[in-house]
Image (cartoon, rainbow, N blue to C red):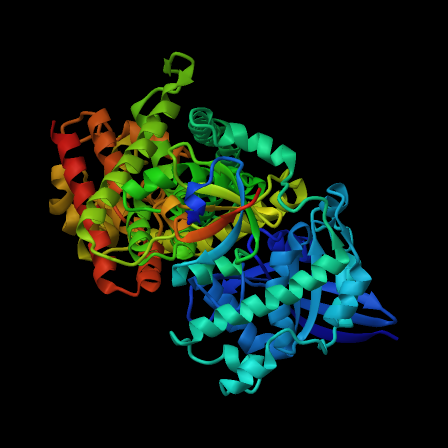
Amino acid sequence: MKTLAQLKQGEKAVINQITEQSLERKLIDLGCVPGEKVQLSKTAPLGCPLAITISGFELSLRKDEAAYIIVDSIA
Amino acid sequence: MSKDAHTNVLLIGNPNAGKTTLFNALTGLHQKTGNYAGVTVDKYTGISSYNSKGINHKLSITDLPGTYSLFPKSLDEDVSFNYLMEHGQESVVVVVCDATNLKRNLLLATQVIDLKLKTVIALNFFDEVEKQNIKININALSEMLGLSLVAVNSRNGEGIENLKKAITEAQVSKASFYDINELNKKGFANYTNFLSQPKKESNNKLEVSDKTYRYSAINYLTAKHIISPVDLKLKQLSQNIDKIITHKIFGYVILLIILFLMFQSIFYIAQFPMQWIEDGFMYLKEFLKNNLPSNKISELLINGVISGISGVVIFIPQIALLFLFITILEDSGYMARASFILDKLMKRFGLNGKSVIPLISGTACAVPSIMATRTISNYKERIITIFILPLISCSARLPVYTLLISLMIKNTSKVFLFNLQGVMLMLMYALGFAMTLITAWILKKVIKNKENSFFIMELPTYRLPHVRNIFLTVINKVKIFVFDAGKIIVSISIILWILSNYGGREFNKVKEQRALFEKQQPLNDSVSNHFNNLELETSYIGTLGHVIEPVIKPLGFDWKIGIAIITSFAAREVFVGTMATIYESRDSENVMSIKEKLMLEQTQDGKPMYTFKLCLSLLLFYVFALQCMSTIATTKRETKSTFITIMQFVYMFALAYLSSFIAFNI
């Protein structure tokens, strides 16, 4: 099982599930829903937070938040 | 013959959808701010007009705070939601969407459609849609959504007339996007009914399923009617800029340079117009003095009212520059990057990356910055941010710093290439900021809270700030300052003038004596000065100053400074005006700037009063003390806690007293 926090810079994946409920409610407002493609676009200088690209915009979130987002790799 | 029609319009939309730019494009300078009932969020309203077929439409437009959906998750979103539910029926709702990012923006749009309100969708940033080669079939989407979609570019005003036309013709959409069966099963008659239910834990699941349902509908629509080149590709330019701006070394260097330039220019560039304003007012006073009959009323006008007004006007250059910088940094998308690269550091001090924006705009004013903390959803992080914000040196302290620093250091002094006064000013800001972090760190250890902390934030595409939009924002902010702060400052100046020109029995005795002397021979300068000082000391305000003198004496302050400190509670900048009024009200013969007067001021034993030590002590007092009624009131309203409000005041006062005491006595 892979989470968003484990992606490498530039790696793409598909969101499978968000396992924390309050986080899920927040992210869904921003279009972060299961089935969406994401890409890890950058990491802040101190290793956290991360920035992901999703349906045409960029979203930043902390590493521990990203760890709640389970993703499927795409080839 | 022309008829009149009136329409209320609500602008609602995601943060970064260009809502405020659109609001500016619609209303120009016809804007007002007020408050929403019961909350302190600034409510921006404005007027726009549209003529068609002999009907003159007047549009009253309200700009609601940015929101991602109708399930509010922050205090800002609460405000938008409540206002929409309350006033939606009698208004036309314009959902402002970032057209380059429609999928997400349509979530809110479909929710508003389901409320069965008259709705129009504005597709903002349409110029970028064309540039990015995105094809949107507006007609087809319009038909599917059952309402008008209008392409606009709020930055240059394209499409604004079409939008106004659509507003005047707005209809309730017949489309619906919620799962009717699902809601009926749970006992909700319709969507409005569902949203207006008190929020319960059990509704969370419903919220998620509602949105999932919407996204599948939106995906169907966008797949059919929008052709976007590549889904995961962002604007290359933005990505390239970010490589530098969020770089592990350059990122912080750039941030420091920006802040440094900001402060240097506020101090250096602003001093020229400030000098012109000061000279202008001195000239005006001189002119009035020579041309008005000399009586109490002209004295009140010249030394009370005009001194008060000049104390407000002189502020405009600095405030305008500060808001100019902040607006550019926000509009360009830089502020979000500053939050991004600082979140981890901020977290160490119990803060959030989102605290960066309030902290930077705190250099303008603590009041709107405290309100801006509403985007921080974690209670502990928000409370810490609010608590420490007034320690950031705000623009109201600038005139006080400016005056005191100019008394301490000669204008020509330099360190390398930098003006020493400017460096001293930066030091004061740095000191405030250092204390801000230390305090935050202490609070982090003290406050216990287990709630999750989030840092979920959009990094908007870099956009070149639009000159007209920035100009309008700065003008409107300055206008608010001039009228809000101005009212207080001018009235205090008048009260001060009265208090310093009248007094009890002692005061009248001095007056009689002076008259007696004057009968015998014209008074020379030194005798006249002697009487001036005696009159001020025995006036009502002098008495008040003497009452508090024992408390502030250890800091080196006399009763005159005491008066200025008391009146500073209305707003810190009043300090300068008060000093001007105190020294001026007794001295109607000479027109001199307040700085020159303070330099001549002596202690009882004939030494200069405003020494380096005293100025430093006073400076430190103003860096730390929470002398601002508006901030205290805002903290109370935003935290809803008397305890926090009192603690904040006591803590900052103790800091101020202690540091001034040390500075003066070492």
Residue at 42% across, 67% down: B39
Q: Nearer the viewer, residue B291 or B1?
A: B1
- Determine whether, in the image, residue B235 is placed left or right of residue B280: right
Q: Position of residue B30 (x, y in %)?
A: 65, 58
In this view, the residue farthest toward the top is B416
Q: Position of residue B355 (x, y in %)?
A: 38, 46
Tell me the quarter of the picture where residue B620 sits: top left
- Determine whether, in the image, residue B448 is placed left or right of residue B366: left
Q: Nearer the viewer, residue B56 or B370?
A: B370
Quarter of the image that includes the C terminus of chain B: top left
Tell me the quarter of the picture where residue B60 sits: bottom right
Tell me the quarter of the picture where residue B38 sits: bottom left
Q: Is residue B525 above or below residue B653?
A: above
Q: Is residue B632 above or below residue B411?
A: below
Q: Position of residue B100 (x, y in %)?
A: 68, 49
Q: Is residue B461 above or below residue B37?
A: above
Q: Nearer the viewer, residue B121 or B384?
A: B121
The answer to whether any part of residue B513 appears in the image is no
Q: Is residue B210 above or below residue B652?
A: below
Q: Position of residue A74 (x, y in %)?
A: 56, 45
- Determine whether, in the image, residue B439 is placed left or right of residue B299: left
Quarter of the image that includes the N terminus of chain B: bottom right
Residue at 42% across, 63% down: B75
Q: Nearer the viewer, residue A72 or B509?
A: A72
The answer to whether any part of residue A63 appears in the image is yes
- Number of callouts: 0
